[in-house]
Amino acid sequence: MMKLQRRSFLAATAGLTFLSAFPRMVLADGHDMLKVAIAAETGDLDLLQNVSTLSSYTVVFDALIHYGPGGVLEPGLATAWTVADDGLSISFDLREGVTFSDGTQFDADAAEWNLKRWMGVADFSWIGISAAFGSIIKDAPNKITVTLTRPVAAALLELTIVRPVRFLSPKAADADGKQTAPIGTGPWIVESYASDKTVLVRNDAYWGEKPSFARMELLVVPDELARANGLRAGDLDVIGGDWVAPLSPRRASALKTDGMTVVAEPGTATTILGYSPKSPMMQDKAVRDAIFIGVDRAAIAAVLFEGYADPTVNIFPTTVPTAGTRGEVPMRDVAAAQAALTAGGWAGDASGFTKDGAPLLIDFLVSDESFPGSRRIAEMIQGQLMEIGIQCNISSVDNATMHDRRPKFEYDLTFFATYGAPYDPHGSLGASFVTAADTGPDGKIYVSDDLDKVVLAALDAGGEAREPAMQAVYDWISANTAACPLVVSQRIWAVNPRLKGFGLPATDYDLPFKGITLG
């Protein structure tokens, strides 16, 4: 899934502000409520269905393990865990004294019931620990062991993802196991949800640090301009986050000028220019090399992202674990790009190159409908490539066409992005660089039989072997110029100045509320 789809970073939407969508706070405890914008309704938060906004799960449901800054694994409903030397079992000490918000006790029985809802189930075979599931052993009232049929190096990281791995009250399901209510052990309880908002109340029985305010409203505001105006008017307290309510760099700059507090931190997902492995033109490494050298990453970050992005040549940023050694971001070098083409048998200059009588002409597939703002980036890259002598046609298509053409590799260039924390590095490598993985309309950044072997070996590597195995993947991609990383978008949020202690959670799948006090 594309980063650009999550962040409409160049949207300049005009029209109504929809301020009527924000109910004015008339309650006596109005100052005890946090109002957060979300771009789409939360839905019923069914942990086994892909129908709800991902970020909303994280305030209601806990996982065994939580994802901390930089990929550090932190205790959740498990206070400790031990992976067997052979990697075929993981034992968990469960947190004692925890109850679901309906009063049901969390223990080994509840943990087993939850885990068996998705572990070993075909629909969740994309999760390694599910595909390799063996059994669950209840060692004690608050201790379980999960056995596996094969080692899964990323198993602990997989247990931090948003769904389906989080824990539901066993009483919140019918006789067929279908979820009937969003009842978790988390810091917030769903009071109500509808198409326009979800209302949450503080779980005063929460086992961890409790929020300082009693209520939180998640207000559905699909339009970015309406979100910004709502923040200015005081009808919203928080906007931003790629998976919550995307905030463009342009809008963030305007809000900062207007006195709002803007918080931007290094991101966890990389925007990548992908070369089609099925394109005859892109099979020529000299062409891939020329594009890699000829793109001005610093200009893209500074101009199109207004400084809210960091240029890169690495598949993953350092905010992702085992991201590999850092490559130096090259200065754009037109002469070096032309020299790479000449060395590859192309003849020509800035007016154009040919080889065996064929012109160097590439098709750049973009969709502003699928990925708002992608056409403007493509136009900047198009201009940079034309200065080298690479002719570039931009094919601007609708969402349906993009979803049809990208998996078929019917393009020369197009945009991709890594999934970000907590799914990376294993998520993007396993999906976007392995031929057999089914990624649907997301397509593949690059695939080849040789790359398959290197990636699969890295995904299976554990312990001390994991880091060098991962580095081997990055080295292969670099040596073969199999992808062209561009920038890492920063994580941007804007908040009302009445909020104190606002900080970003470890991932954009988490809603920010921890440590906040309301003025």
Image: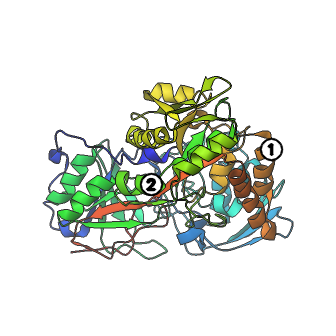
Above or below, 502 against 486 in this view is: below
- What percent of the width, then of the height, locates residue 46? 50, 46
Residue 367 horizontal side relative to residue 338, left or right: left
Q: Which residue lies furthest to the top in this view?
A: 357
Helix, strand or loop at mark 2: helix
Please, what is the three-letter code of the amino acid marked with disc 2?
Ser
Of residue 5 and residue 391, the one placed in the foreground of this image is 391
Helix, strand or loop at mark 1: helix
Q: Residue furthest right?
A: 86
Above or below, 356 against 47 in this view is: above
Which numbered circle lies on residue 450? 1
- What percent of the width, then of the height, locates residue 492? 37, 60
**What residue do we see at 56% from left, 27% from top?**
405
**What residue do we see at 44% from left, 27% from top?**
397
Residue 116 makes an appearance in the image: no
Which numbered circle lies on residue 55? 2
In front: label 2 or label 1:
1
Residue 384 horizontal side relative to residue 121, left or right: left
Disc 2 crowd rating (10 Å Cα; few below 14, some 14-19, many 20+) is many
Q: Answer with the quarter of the image where residue 491 lies.
A: bottom left
- What percent of the width, then of the height, locates residue 487? 49, 55
